[in-house]
Image (spheres, rainbow, N blue to C red):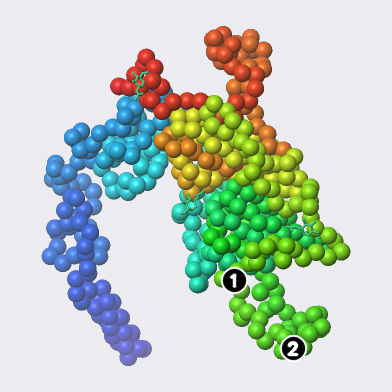
Amino acid sequence: MEIRSKFSIRLIVLAITINLSLALPSSPQPYSWTGSFGDDESSEISPLRGHPSLLGVITKEVNPESSASVSSDKYELAPGQGASAELGIPFTFEDTTNPQPIRGDLGSTDPGPRTYSYDRLNPDTLAPPGSDSGDVEQAKWPMGLSHNRILPGHAGWSRQENVHNLPLATAMAGVDMKLAPWAYRELHWHKANEWGLILNGSVRLQTMNEDGQTFVDDLTEGDVWYFPSGIPHSLQGLDKGSEFMLVFDQGDFDDGGTSLASEMFLRNPKEVLSKNLQAPLTDFDDLPKDQLYIFNGTPAPKDIKEQNVTGPGGFAAGAESYTYHLSKQKSYETPGGSIKIIDPINFPIARNFSAALVTIKPGAMREIHWHGTSDEWGFFISGNARVSVYIAPTSGATFDFSAGDVSYVPATASHYIENIGNEDVVFLEVLQAPRFTDISVGQWLKLTPKQIIKDTLHLPDSLLDNLSPNKQYIVQGNTNLTSALGSRGPT
Ligand SMILES: *[C@@H]1O[C@H](CO)[C@@H](O)[C@H](O)[C@H]1NC(C)=O
Ligand SMILES: *[C@@H]1O[C@H](CO)[C@@H](O)[C@H](O)[C@H]1NC(C)=O
Ligand SMILES: *[C@@H]1O[C@H](CO)[C@@H](O)[C@H](O)[C@H]1NC(C)=O
Ligand SMILES: *[C@@H]1O[C@H](CO)[C@@H](O)[C@H](O)[C@H]1NC(C)=O
């Protein structure tokens, strides 16, 4: 009994000694960040966590020299930024050295830390108009923030927006892809339907459907294609290569998850391949050892007829065509810009894809509207714009967009696209619908009994009389803030 207890006391003492020696640091911990209120002065060495004496009230520690206010000589407001937040006029921080989150009487200076580039790209996020309200899900995803998949041999790259980086975008996803001259997007197929617009350069594409009907065509900047789910297809960049934007009708589409010709051959026993294609085993010696995805190829023949393979199913011509030469379509002109509409009425195979390619002049605006049945997936090809989204019943938010940004607006949510820059805004809007439609707010006000509008919104006769019974699509505007502000003027 006695021996046992002495032994256990010795064990406890040993354990305490080990614990103590573990608790004492053998050398001071590295300590580099210095707060503006100074270091922990309670100890010579800098422990990883500060001294308990720093807890709670230490009045003498307040440093009168440090300030969270930016003094007025250290920043200037952008032209128009001082105007009432209720007006919500657009302004740019382009020539503003130290942009501040201030609009009219709202906001306060920001001493940092921050990265000014974000503020310059998003003035309406830093200093939102007074009309913004409540919670609105993020409606913008810059493709420049998407991880890029870059392929060997400078063959190309691809990056994507889907519900994983833009959670609001549940019904559609986008893939931005580049093919170098003669590079291929490998023969492949997938579960989603695919709609594509060429942004730059030209491609040759081909496909074959379930009926053995074939198709081949060359497309250039501004042209469109469509591949239904499951149909195997490939694309090849022509002599100058190509960049294009793909839109899929599934929010969780992943371009890394498509079925590939190379993988399908790798996933079947060679014995099976040999039997199926009635060829000796040695014919499969040179199959690729890994998937190709995007890879360099041999130059396509100049004459497309050399690649026009047809069988008993014939060629997919006319209404069965997988392409539409939108670049050749005449734009519908409006005073503020122009618009091209492509939907199953002119491109029948793309059964549920309806789109508009809109050009908005500086100061002009794609009018306030909403789409009744479909979300809108958008892509900004050029310029600078802002968009306010109204989400029922009481929320609204304004987002700024520039070339390379994706936008997403839920069905029935009203929105406009205002050109707030000095160059044309070119904007693609894509719907899941059998026809491109929207409700135009101007047209709706005009075609509703005047009495109802006046009782509801208290708008004057002069305004209602001036409205057109036709959809405007793009309304004119000006870029002159002084004139836009009218008699109220900036403060
Ligand atoms: C295509 O790329 C060329 C060269 O970079 C550029 O000059 C041109 O503006 C691009 N076209 C479009 C529509 O972006
Ligand atoms: C391919 O050949 C078919 C006839 O078999 C023809 O109808 C079609 O226009 C051709 N397409 C091209 C792009 O040459
Ligand atoms: C078209 O898209 C809408 C909106 O996503 C969907 O509700 C509808 O089922 C689709 N129609 C067809 C024929 O796929
Ligand atoms: C802007 O508009 C105001 C008022 O309409 C006018 O006086 C001024 O000259 C305009 N400025 C420019 C640069 O056009």
Instruction: Please provide percent x and percent y for residue 184.
Output: 60, 66
Q: Quadrant of residue 109?
A: top left
Cα separation, mark 1 vs mark 2, equals 25 Å
On residue 297, the disc is 1
Instruction: Please provide percent x and percent y for residue 375.
Output: 63, 41
On residue 285, the disc is none
- The residue under label 2 is which amino acid type? Leu
| Residue 280 appears left or right of 26 | right
Quarter the C terminus occupies: top left
Residue at screen point 60% across, 77% down: 290
Does the Cβ of the disc 1 residue fall within 8 Å of ligand 2?
A: no
- SS category of the residue bearing label 1: loop
Query: In front here: 284 or 110?
Result: 284
Residue at screen point 73% across, 45% down: 347
Q: Residue furthest right?
A: 312
| Residue 50 appears left or right of 259 | left
What residue is shown with label 2?
281
Residue 117 visible in the shown view:
yes
Residue at screen point 19% across, 71% down: 28
